[in-house]
Image: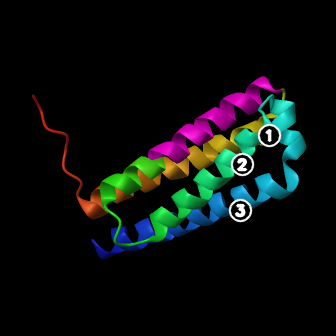
Amino acid sequence: MKSKQFYYWLLTGLMSSFMFFAAWFAETHQAEFTGRMGFPPYFRVELTVAKILGGIVLLIPGIPARIKEWVYVGFCICMISALVAKIHSGYGFLEASQPGFSLAFFLLAIMLLNKVKRLPDFPKN
């Protein structure tokens, strides 16, 4: 159990750092990127705020696991959207596949969260 918890916090720290970096990079280097993808400028700001808040929520130990799970779901949706947008914007395979790799790590983090925090299943009707 201790090793799963260690790997959960390690992966959570890495993925939160990744989202903090992505938020910083989006605000400092990606103004033309969002235009190329066809997104309005305010959308970049919304994503930046969401990435920062989500990264903070994941790092605070006292926040309920169900909320952290939803933060991970939001990050997964963000990565799927980025993958689709990059594919349809004509990016090369390596550039377009980066969100897919991040998605795999987020899914692994969700699985570890469920093992470490022992989230109950949804009630069956």
Residue at screen point 40% across, 56% down: 68
Identity, as a three-letter code, of the amino acid under mark 1:
Pro
Rounded to the nearest whole Å, what is the CA distance between mark 3 and mark 2? 14 Å
Indicate whether residue 20 is drawn in magenta: no
* Circle 1/circle 2 CB separation < 8 Å: yes
Visible in this render: residue 91?
Answer: no
Is residue 51 toward the left or the right of residue 11 in the image? right
The quadrant of the image that shows the N terminus is bottom left
Q: Residue furthest left?
A: 125
Closest to the camera, between mark 3 and mark 1, is 1
Amino acid residing under circle 3: Phe
Q: Main secondary structure of the magenta part?
A: helix
Q: Position of residue 2 (x, y in %)?
A: 31, 76
Q: Which residue is mark 1?
A: 41
**Labels 3, 2: front one:** 2
Q: Which residue is mark 2?
A: 45
Label 3 or label 1, whichever comes before in sequence order = 3
| Left or right, residue 43 beside residue 1 | right
Distance (Cα) linking label 1 and label 2: 7 Å
Magenta residues span 73-89
* Residue positioned 78% across, 34% down in the render: 40
Looking at the rendering, which quadrant does residue 6 occupy? bottom left
Q: Which residue is mark 3?
A: 21
Answer above or below: position of 24 versus 6.
Answer: above
